[in-house]
Image (tube, rainbow, N blue to C red):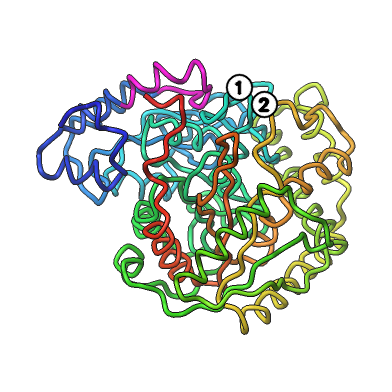
Amino acid sequence: MAIKDYAKYDALGLADLVKKKKVKPSELLEEAIARAEALNPKLNAIIYKDYDNARTRAKGKLRGPFAGVPFLLKDIFALTTTMPTRQAARFMPAIPWPHNSVLVERFLAAGLVPFGKTNVPEFGIVATTESELYGPAHNPWNLAHSTGGSSGGSGAAVAAGILPMAHANDGGGSIRIPASCNGLVGLKPTRGRMTFAPDFGEIVDGLATDLVVSRTVRDTAAALDATAGPVMGDPYWAPPQPASYLDSMKRKPKKLRIAFASKTLDGRAFHEDCTAAVKRAAKLCRDLGHDVEDASPNLDQAVLIPAFMALWGGGLASGIDTIAEMTGRKPTDKDFEGTTWGLYEQGRHVTASDYLRAKGHLQAAGREAARFHETYDVWLTPTLSRPPVKLGFFDLSERDVAKSFGAQIDYVPFTAMQNATGQPAINVPLHWNKDNLPIGVQFVGRFGDEETLLKLAAQLEKAAPWVERYAKISL
């Protein structure tokens, strides 16, 4: 194999080269490290290097669908013995975890070779990756622009060609937002599909989940095969999954009834680039034989946003207070960015009654979404309301929660809904604007139905391939 061809392969493609003995895992790892060393000074996508442990692993006996493929873990909830997980927080000590999370064990069992951790915003709570601890991650399509959040480092590293797939997680859009900003595939699985064992039953009352960002639909499907499934003791499980998402996505989907959003739920227009992306995706779906019409579920933003923020703030407060208990440190405003401290302070004042009523509102939204999907198989929206913003667009020193998060909710008007309802949703990179910035679209499926989303995404990938599009920073 000519190493210069490395970026042309997805993760399964690289694994196949290893299987056929055309390349060694150690050679792939050194290529990934060389790319990281060359590009990361511009991108700031990788904030922790674990090259020595990765080199040892690459020389060992590797098995699984991704055997020998270089990989990066996100600096949030990918707990491992070989690297610290700080969540971009100065308040979190820089020490490795005493054991691997089940997710990390499953990544390792799939044959992946982690060699570092990726950049994130503080505690993953905002839609851009530019923390005080790590500094901003830069979008490889235009270095002045944001990579999205909170899996922004993972998105930048994959889009730049450092590796074909990286770990990501999503509590309000944090897989799909960076996938949109960086021109990648990003699937948020159904609530309960992934486990947080052994340390947690759930994260933020079921809002959060894990998977990857990748360049191809088949890599995402294979990653879901490798990592999905409950562990005894999990608080709830997702509906049964197919024997193989990878096998099932190869089959053409049935004729689908697809609804698309032409405006936000409170009636506001999108940026013209995002409108163009949705129109293009809707036309493509029609051309593929699906029924497409303008419709959206009846979800009240005035109720849902405060309910989501009650859980979001309460979850952050619980997390910070847990770290304080573990370390014996008292949180002060000097330990955190302004936006984090403002949400922490608000979260500490959420009463048990507030929390349970908010949870009830989100569960009612799940019922309404289920009714909507009795008519429609899939809901199509823009992933963002505007193209990727420039770095510094959001004031992360702002402590007023209404101001700081109001701007972000305007930027990402749809993604948190699926975290609230638990539905699967996937970003598909079907459009680039005149400035060559990616403009992703989101497809939302019925609860438990990742299979339909992956089949449709694979069909779209074949009809309008994106894999040959590379960010200009790529080697």
Disc 1 crowd rating (10 Å Cα; few below 14, some 14-19, many 20+) is: many
The Cα atoms of the two marked residues, 2 and 1, are separated by 6 Å
To which residue does mark 1 refer?
Answer: 134
Q: Position of residue 120 (x, y in %)?
A: 59, 33
Label tally = 2
To which residue does mark 2 refer?
Answer: 131
Given residues 173 and 308, the one toward you in this image is: 173
Which image quadrant: the N terminus?
top left
Which image quadrant: the C terminus?
top left
Residue 372 in which image quadrant: bottom right
- Residue range (magenta): 32-49
Which residue type carries mark 1? Tyr
Q: Are marks 2 and 1 in contact (CB under 8 Å)?
A: yes
Disc 2 crowd rating (10 Å Cα; few below 14, some 14-19, many 20+) is: many
Given residues 34 and 75, the one toward you in this image is: 34
Residue at figure coordinates x 36%, y 59% from the top left: 462
Residue 422 in which image quadrant: bottom right
Residue at figure coordinates x 32%, y 34% from the top left: 7
Which residue type carries mark 2? Ser
Q: Position of residue 104 (x, y in %)?
A: 40, 44
Q: Which circle marks residue 157 in the picture?
A: none
Given residues 3 and 365, the one toward you in this image is: 3
Given residues 297 and 202, the one toward you in this image is: 297
Residue at figure coordinates x 87%, y 56% from the top left: 351
Circle 1 — which element?
loop
